[in-house]
Amino acid sequence: MVLFIASLVGIFKYNELPEKFNPYVQYKASLENKDIGDDDEIAILNISGTESYHVLFINSYNSINEIVEELKIAEAKLNYSTKKILEEHL
């Protein structure tokens, strides 16, 4: 199985999120039945080879391994620098 590479676009507070990512964030929030606060940190990942983004609500994870497992389901893996940056935010 070929895995897509997930690269960090940015980590934003919800109230500073660029508008083009809002539909992805709203969709993920509806899947998780999550209320989003203005100060919640949200990581946006670009999935290589697609026009898709993967949303991570930073405070929903206790370890980088939880993110790695979630991305495996989406047939994606973190690139090295993205993994290191996310580890600093957890």
Image (tube, rainbow, N blue to C red):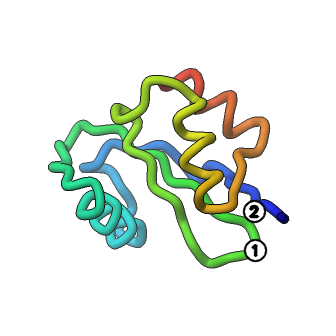
Q: Is label 2 in contact with label 1 (beta carbons under 8 Å)?
A: yes
Helix, strand or loop under label 1: loop
Residue 52 coordinates in the image, percent (x, y): 57, 73
Residue 18 coordinates in the image, percent (x, y): 39, 61
Which residue carries the number 2 mark?
Answer: 4
Q: Amino acid at mark 1?
A: Gly
The residues tagged by marks 2 and 1 sit, at their Cα atoms, a distance apart of 7 Å
Helix, strand or loop under label 2: strand
Q: Residue furthest right?
A: 2
Q: Count every numbered label the image shows and give the total.
A: 2
Location of residue 48 with respect to 9 vertically, above or below: below
Q: Is residue 50 left or right of residue 41?
A: right
- Quick one: 72 or 52, which is closer to the camera? 72
Rendered-image quadrant of the N terminus: bottom right
Residue 22 coordinates in the image, percent (x, y): 33, 67
Quarter holding residue 3: bottom right
The residue shown at (15%, 49%) is: 35
